[in-house]
Image (tube, rainbow, N blue to C red):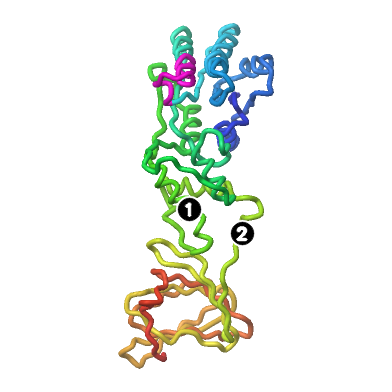
Amino acid sequence: MNVLVTGAKGFIGKNLIETLSRMENINILEIDRENSILELEEAIKKSDFIYHLAGINRPENPEEFYKGNRDLIGNLIDILEKNNLKTPILVTSSIQAERENDYGKSKLEGENLLKEYSKRNNCPIYIYRLPNVFGKWCRPNYNSVIATWCNNIANDLEVQVSDRNIELTFVYIDDIVKKFASHLNEEKNIENIYYEIDITYRKTLGEILDLLLEFKNNRENLIISKVGNGFERALYGTYLSYLPKDKFSYELKEYKDPRGSFVEILKTVDSGQFSISTSKPGITRGNHYHNTKNEKFLVIKGEAVIRFRHIYSDEVIEYHVSDKKLEVVDIPTGYTHNITNTGTDEMVLVLWANEQFDRENPDTYYLEV
């Protein structure tokens, strides 16, 4: 199947092509602004489906809106009909099409040309009036507040916000290209014309700015926001894509003493923290218990014995662990416990605790096993 993508080097175009390139039996034809009208015509004649993503949204004069958003669609349709083709077309329009400005009017006039093409040729079209789109590879300082703020915050540049309470609708690039790609394998439907992205987010500028600053500060306070799903997941992935190439990494603070070292890696908002501890041969750490706090131990280098004793019992329980068999050991509440490096080399322990360490209320009480 030959699939044409106009605006191939743009933000949506690059992300769509990445998705299409992983699909079987798809041959992608790319057209961008440096291609000639003859090259466009040759690509159209070969196409089984057209994604028309090219357009103008920041011209030097208003006439360019109509040339890039209306007339280009007209040229595309002329080529199709001249060659007796009835190729399905998906076009990215804008929610601005409902407004009385030159950008919106040019988008609306382009939509109308497509609808007439569909009626004349009994051919399906797919019009998406997209709101604010965000995601990786979006150009900063252009027409996306998220792209601009991600770029500026990641690069220690100033961020300006006129009104924190302004609320906008956003769609994430991965949700867009997934929906776009789904049309290639569905039955053609000439009844539907307008389509929407299934997942949208309503967020204020203040909410977005606060999240981005949390992401940046994570490298200092190690506290990661809830970035596992929804808008936060999408925004965090977007933010990381704007990190400068020499700032992908950051150092952690290491606490050393004669026994070994201790390093905090990551602290979550509501699910505790991750740390690493090293111990020299023969060193024992712990000899304490917790009433509510719980931990998980995983030895990833060396060997050790983890000992437990119920605080009201004399029975000592032992677990022998090593990097030869990766296993997680839960530390039950009400059991005093310790861990001893029984090997001849340094032992490395990965720890998870269900809560962030609170120096004022550590819930840790000394008691020999």
Q: Are marks 2 and 1 in contact (CB under 8 Å)?
A: no
Please state the horizontal and vertical placement of residue 109, each as a whole percent of the image: 47, 14
**Image point (65%, 17%), residue name:** 40
Q: Nearer the viewer's eye, disc 2 or disc 1?
A: 1
Q: How many marks?
A: 2
Q: Amino acid at mark 1?
A: Leu
Image x and y of residue 85, in percent: 56, 11
- The residue closer to the viewer here, 103 or 94, is 103
Q: Please tell me whether mark 2 sits on a helix, a strand or a loop.
A: loop
**Residue 169 image position (x, y, % from top left):** 40, 36
**Local secondary structure at mark 1:** helix
Q: Using the rendered image of the protein, determine whether residue 1 is visible from the camera's viewpoint.
A: no
Under mark 2, the amino acid is Ser
For marks 2 and 1 on the same chain, the one whose residue lies earlier in the sequence? 1
Disc 2 designates what residue? 249
Q: Quadrant of residue 253?
A: bottom right
Q: Residue 182, position in %: x, y?
A: 47, 31
Image: magenta residue range: 95-111
**At 46% from the left edge and 59% from the top edge, which residue is drawn?**
224
Identified at 45% across, 47% down, the residue is 209
**The one of 134 and 88 positioned closer to us in this rendering:** 134
Q: Which mark is residue 213?
A: 1
Image vertical order of residue 73 relative to residue 366, above or below: above
Magenta segment main secondary structure: helix
Q: Look at the picture and state if 67 lies above or below 164.
A: above
Q: Quadrant of the N terminus?
A: top right
Q: Residues within 10 Å of mark 1 (few under 14, many from 20)?
A: some
Mark 2 nearby-residue class (10 Å; few <14, some 14–19, many ≥20): few
